Amino acid sequence: MNEWLFSRRMVMKAMLLASAVPCVEHSRAFASSCDDHIVRIATIASPNTLNPFATWDAFYPLIYTYDALVGWDAQHHPDRKGFAKDWSVADDNLTWTFKIWPGMKWSDGRPATARDAAFTYNYLKDSIGTPDELNVGWNSTAGLDVVASFTAIDEETLQILTKVPTRWPIDHFTSIVPEHIWKGISYADARGPFRNDSPLVGTGPMIVSEFQQGQFVRLAPNPYFRTGQPKTAGIIFQFFSTPDPIAQGLKDGGFDYGMNLTVAQWADLSKEPAIAAGKLRIPQRDYLAFNTASGAGAGSTKALQDPAFRDAIGYAIDQKAMVERALHGLADPGVGPIVPMATDYYSDLSDIRRHFDLAEAGRRLDAAGYRDTNGDGVREDKEGKGFQLELIAGNGDVNVVIPIAAIQLVAGWLGQIGIPVSVTQLEIGSLNERTSAPTNGGGGWDLLIGTSWPSAQPDLLLRFGKSNGYGNKSYWTNDTFDKLMSELDVTIDLKKRQELVDQAVRLLYTDAPYIILCYPFLLDARRKDCFEGWGTEDTMSTESYFPADRLRPI
């Protein structure tokens, strides 16, 4: 059921990896000046279209123009609401009611109502099963199998009736679009040919007014935004393929905000008195995965399929040292699959948490039957074969790059307990091929250092443990875990969900198909001299339009 939402990693991957051509930095149109009250933002991104039905790589800037119905931020920050002002679910746990902001307007001045929301969802739903089903972009049919109907009860009331209890109506992210713009667009055109050229029509605080692919996006303040027109004169996003011009532009005053900085750049900018360097907690996890497959796609030894072997390896991984030595302290040490920003569900697992102890790792390997019987410094598996594991890794399909130093640390620690490791660094295409499902020709490796950025929702954070689940790089299967996930899918009550998540997390941790290495920070920086109203914990949200609605000139 939760296969409906693609990983946020996929979205950010497209942003971070797309080829981008920087526009001329010193052109008069983009000259830096606090006086014009235009916020200048630099990032590694390159949207290929402004059509939310046809792309995954336009999170920026569409998040500022189109509202989600609810979404993650609105559930955790009451001042970051989307298209719906309030929502509730009936006692049957099937009937959801959303109250749309009264009197809300689209940026062209027309009324924005529950009918637009119902249209957006039914536009998607009615495409299911057609040759041009809308399943190729951010606005997708994925997940609509759990919904029976979308109905505008009146101008301010949207009702969503689901087939089973599910949090899909508030957890999913679909951009609500204006019916009067989209009702004449065929499904075939919406899948790609219709580029949704600027100026757009939305309900967000900033409206895309100009778009030059690979160069920049200009946004203008929405005069009809529900809490009042933003105080800035607009936003300009400039796109780059590397972070170097971003860091230099922040120093020179050409940019007000930049993200995707390297550790060295971030440390350098931290010394600048006019700059505030930030560390964003994001739902990314870096992990060590074991190839637990048997049969097709299996690794070089059956030991990888043994939970006792994997658990022992966990004692040989020093997450705290990795964060300090490889990530310069710019990450949280890894524990379980739930990231710290998911505060309703995160646990440090203090009662079962492994501690770094190479001697303990050795004792556990001995007890599990993996000894060095001939004294050559290399342990043997239960078939008597000396270990020589292949660890594969690669960067590109990530948001915060996994440092080579982190990979070297893991290889070094395993070598110290008699399990030599050879490291194979792969380009992203090769890495994806080798870690695809064995039924698709993947596998054959032993260990993987990888990463994922799904969402802060527990259903999505845990799905890399589901049998045949999206992102299950370890090929691990466990009927009990799958049952817990199925129950989580149809549970709405927070306390019950927390209990199910805790059981699933503990099962995943003790069976150890993954060892979570760390939760890296996304490094950003902003200048202090032109604008105020930035966030404190998150300078700019990765989940909503914040703080575009409240920035103001100093």
Image (cartoon, rainbow, N blue to C red):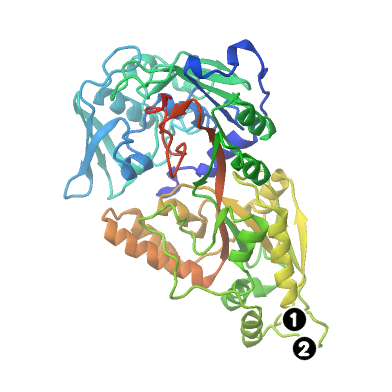
Q: Position of residue 323 (x, y in %)?
A: 61, 59
**Looking at the image, which is closer to me, 385 or 350?**
350
Q: Residue at x 61, y 36 (%)?
A: 16
Q: Residue at x 54, y 28 (%)?
A: 256
- Location of mark 2 (residue): 373
| Quarter location, residue 187 | top left
> Looking at the image, is 182 positioned above or below residue 476?
above
In the rendered structure, find residue 354 and report the number of the disc placed on it: none
Can see residue 444? Answer: no
- Location of mark 1 (residue): 380
**Looking at the image, which is closer to me, 28 or 226?**
28
Label 2 and label 1: CA atoms lie apart by 7 Å
Mark 1 residue type = Glu
- Report helix, strand or loop for mark 1: loop
Q: Could you tell me which quadrant the C terminus lies in?
A: top left
Q: Position of residue 169 (x, y in %)?
A: 31, 41
Q: Residue at x 58, y 78 (%)?
A: 308
Can see residue 251? Answer: yes
Mark 2 residue type = Thr
Q: Are marks 2 and 1 in contact (CB under 8 Å)?
A: yes
Marked residue nearer the N-terminal end (2 or 1): 2
Is 403 on the left-hand or right-hand side of 315? Answer: right
Q: Position of residue 226 (x, y in %)?
A: 28, 23
Dot 2 alpha-carbon crowd within 10 angstroms: few under 14, some 14 to 19, many 20 or more: few
| Quarter location, residue 367 | bottom right
> Looking at the image, is 520 positioned above or below residue 256?
below
- Report helix, strand or loop for mark 2: loop
